[in-house]
Amino acid sequence: MAEGLSLKNITKRFGNFTALNHVSFDIKPGEFVTLLGPSGCGKTTLLRIIAGFLEPDEGEVWFGDQKMNDVPPHKRNTAMCFQSYALFPHKTVYENIRFGLRMRKVPASQHRALVEEAMAMVNLTGLENRKPYELSGGQQQRVALARSVVVRPNILLFDEPLSNLDAKLREKVRVEIRDLQRKLGITAIYVTHDQSEALAISDTIISMNQGAIIQKSDPRTIYDRPVSKFIADFIGTANLVPCTVTRQQGSLFQVQSPYGMLLAEDKDFPHDSGEYYLCIRPEDVRPVLDGEPAGEDNILEGVVKNSIYMGNTLDLFARVQTEPLRASVWKDYHIEEGTRIRFAVPRSKIRILEG
Ligand SMILES: Nc1ncnc2c1ncn2[C@@H]1O[C@H](COP(=O)(O)OP(=O)(O)OP(=O)(O)O)[C@@H](O)[C@H]1O
Ligand SMILES: [Mg+2]
């Protein structure tokens, strides 16, 4: 059964260093939540506190309506799945998966059925007698996954489970993880520093930096409406330049920037900040071909310095005034390096962000 989870004001220090600083959030039963952030921001520390392997210095951990601070790890009914898999090298697949059942003192008579069911869920049927070294990386990852789900946890914790796999396999296995989590209806907390993985797999993304939460949103919101320059830069690619607001009328802003004077329509404008940045995603920049009307869009004039064919897009690295501007445009355009060009950016696609 899925269980919701609440962290209330969690602080964790290692000596003088504060690894987590007043972290609070709620997760609904059955939700798939990703913790996303740069190396060292506290993701693993947070998972370990949820699982009970580490005690917070301050704050409370709640599963549903039960406070868990004093509940030992083996009584929390969470399971953890790691990047390193942590499989026993000399045990078979079957024994590796059964391990968790023995740890939890599940009666031996139930083991075979439970292990076989878990193996079927992750497409490992037929491989029960192999040893880990006789499996591919993807298969080893599935054994680790089966070992986590066989104990029927309420909350499944993943710490970068796919980082040892190549890009194609990561995409495949992440869909399998997502399907399995839905099928079992388990609450999942998934750590990654791969932003595309986070966007693809999550109901909710919690973006962290230096032990604090910066934004908690669904993938679309975090990408389209990042709350700060840090998030816009960390998730996806963004043209980010400092700017000054020179006029405001409702949600319409006139801003001065290294790209020139631009108009932006932004209902989420952060009024309390002193320092502002313009954010323009490369895919929102469009070349204006000769004679084509730009309508109300902003026009940025520049020179294409590099033109790179990516297969699915053509990526232009241009210079507008003194500032670099990246544009991802239709792949069938032929735009040579050195071309003088006008780019259009819709008002609604320009975000004004805090620094
Ligand atoms: N046992 C420990 N003793 C001292 N410092 C620690 C300990 N565990 C973690 N830290 C520090 O706390 C910070 C957060 O570590 P954590 O492992 O949570 O980062 P992370 O976000 O998981 O990073 P990565 O993406 O590299 O795995 C780091 O600066 C780390 O050096
Ligand atoms: Mg980590």
Image: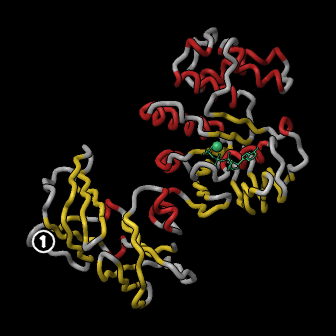
- Residue 332 lies left or right of residue 312; in this view the side is left
- Residue 227 lies left or right of residue 108; in this view the side is left
Circle 1: element type: loop
Whether residue 64 is visible: no
**Is 89 situated above or below 8?**
above
Q: Position of residue 303 (x, y in %)?
A: 18, 65
Check disc 1 and report the residue beneath it: 292
**Which residue is situated farthest in the left direction here?**
291
**Which residue is situated farthest in the front direction here?**
16
Whether residue 320 is visible: yes
Residue drawn at (71%, 45%), measured in percent from left and top? 47
Q: Neighbour class for label 1 at 10 Å: few (<14), some, many (≥20)?
A: few
Q: Position of residue 76 (x, y in %)?
A: 82, 41
Residue drawn at (47%, 56%), measured in percent from left and top? 235
Quadrant of the image for the N terminus? top right
Is the distance from the Cβ of mark 1 to the nearest ligand 1 atom less than 8 Å? no
**Is 263 situated above or below 343?**
below
Residue 280 falls in which quadrant of the image? bottom left
Q: Nearer the viewer, residue 150 or 292?
A: 292
- Mark 1 belongs to which amino acid? Glu
Q: Nearer the viewer, residue 57 or 328?
A: 57
Q: Position of residue 210 (x, y in %)?
A: 64, 58
**Is 130 situated above or below 269?**
above
Residue drawn at (43%, 55%), measured in percent from left and top? 236
Q: Nearer the viewer, residue 269 or 178?
A: 269
